[in-house]
Amino acid sequence: LGVTVLPPGSTVGILGGGQLGRMLSLAAARLGLKCHILAPEPDSPAFQVAAANTVADYRDEAALARFASAVDAVTYEFENVLVEAVTFLEALKPVRPGSKALRIAQDRLLEKRLARDLGARTADFVAVSTRAELDQCTEQIGLPAILKTCRFGYDGKGQASIRSAADADEAYAAMKGQAAILESFVSFEMEVSVVAARGHDGSFAAYEVVENEHRNHILHRSRVPARLSSKVCAEAIAIARRIADALDYAGVFAVEYFCADGQLFVNEIAPRVHNSGHWTLDGCLVSQFEQHMRALAGWPLGSTERHSDVEMINLLGDDVDGWRGLAAEPNTAVHFYGKAEARPGRKMGHVNRLTPRQT
Ligand code: AMP
């Protein structure tokens, strides 16, 4: 299964119907690949741009089996997809990336252990499963620290900071009994990420390191080039490659880092296309979305070269009401996700502002 090549005309199944699935589907169409989306929400943004759609729960094995019979390979667009759905599909069709990468990336403890085992730095961390353990762990790690659920956290959900011992009760309660990890607080100067692709033949192509600014735990702005030395950038890419090799990865993935005093700390691994790679839609010949399709379809990886300097801004909630002004800006590409309701904090679109490449 591992070496199947999907020629133009093939159908790729995507689990998940959000904006990432939508942008994957648009990129696939340009390559002559069709996408079939499976998602539980009838108003999934990806449905508007895909060749075929299935509205089904990820636990519905009859629907998964029908979906598998209609596609040539399967991928997923969010990392909280059920591992059980992926292992079920793996028995029927090639799934890229496979369940091993998914299992590790879904669990903060496993992903940090992997990074450590590969010689990368992370914040100090320790597993916490009871309230009593939390006190021992704060002793061990020191304060301030951050308590996070091991699984199903995103955009700051399932996280609580502990500045003093008095915060411990509330932080523990916020985990709602789920397995957690306590991390030391890294006073970073910058957050950066590497978005890269690995082919199942071991080929590898990284985009340039991206500098990311979060607001309320949600990505606000990405910029390339990052204001970071070429040495640190090369190190970030080398760590990402080691991670992908260790996972025998096929597809696009992202590694998020904190940077403090020129030192990189691995924070998270995302087994999918990533918000901090949206700049590649307009800053590169081949975007992260096309690259993911190429990698999973067994095509040669495309050029990751950056032709412009780019600033990507996420449009959250009613930011999207400014669409007309944004569309009138020179050298700005607008991307709207076709979501009906602009709830506060919901990712509605993004813009890429281009300036001529300086360095
Ligand atoms: P995460 O869900 O792990 O990506 O965390 C969301 C955001 O919280 C990160 O982008 C950081 O801004 C902040 N954060 C998470 N973990 C740490 C840490 N160990 N030290 C400092 N800031 C952190």
Image (cartoon, rainbow, N blue to C red):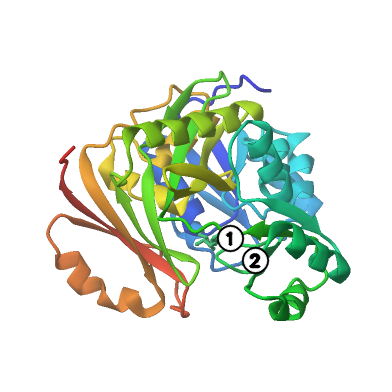
Provide the secondary structure element on which disc 2 rests. Answer: loop
What residue is drawn where x is 71% and y is 60%? 182
| x and y, in percent, of residue 341 in the image | 46, 78
Q: Is residue 90 visible?
A: yes
Which one is closest to the eye, mark 1 or mark 2? 2
State whether residue 257 is above or below residue 342.
above
Q: Is residue 10 visible?
A: no
C-alpha separation, residue under disc 1 versus residue under disc 2? 8 Å
| x and y, in percent, of residue 267 in the image | 57, 50
Q: Where is mark 1, residue-wise? A: 185
Pointer 1 or 2: first along the chain: 2
Labels 1 & 2 near each other (Cβ < 8 A): yes
**Kind of residue at disc 2:** Leu
In this view, the residue in front, 177 or 4, is: 177
What residue is drawn where x is 58% and y is 31%? 244
Ligand 1 resides in the quarter of the picture at bottom right
Bin the neighbour count of mark 2 within 10 Å (Cα to Cα): few under 14, some 14-19, many 20 and up. Answer: some
State whether residue 25 is above or below residue 73.
below
What residue is drawn where x is 49% and y is 43%? 264
* Apparent side of residue 15 relative to residue 137 in the rendered image (left or right): left
* Apparent side of residue 65 relative to residue 318 in the rendered image (left or right): right
**Kind of residue at disc 1:** Phe
In this view, the residue in front, 90 or 65, is: 90
Image quarter of the N terminus: top right
In this view, the residue in front, 173 or 206, is: 173
Q: Where is mark 2, residue-wise? A: 143
Q: Is mark 1 within 8 Å of ligand 1?
A: yes
Provide the secondary structure element on which disc 1 rests. Answer: loop
Image quarter of the C terminus: top left
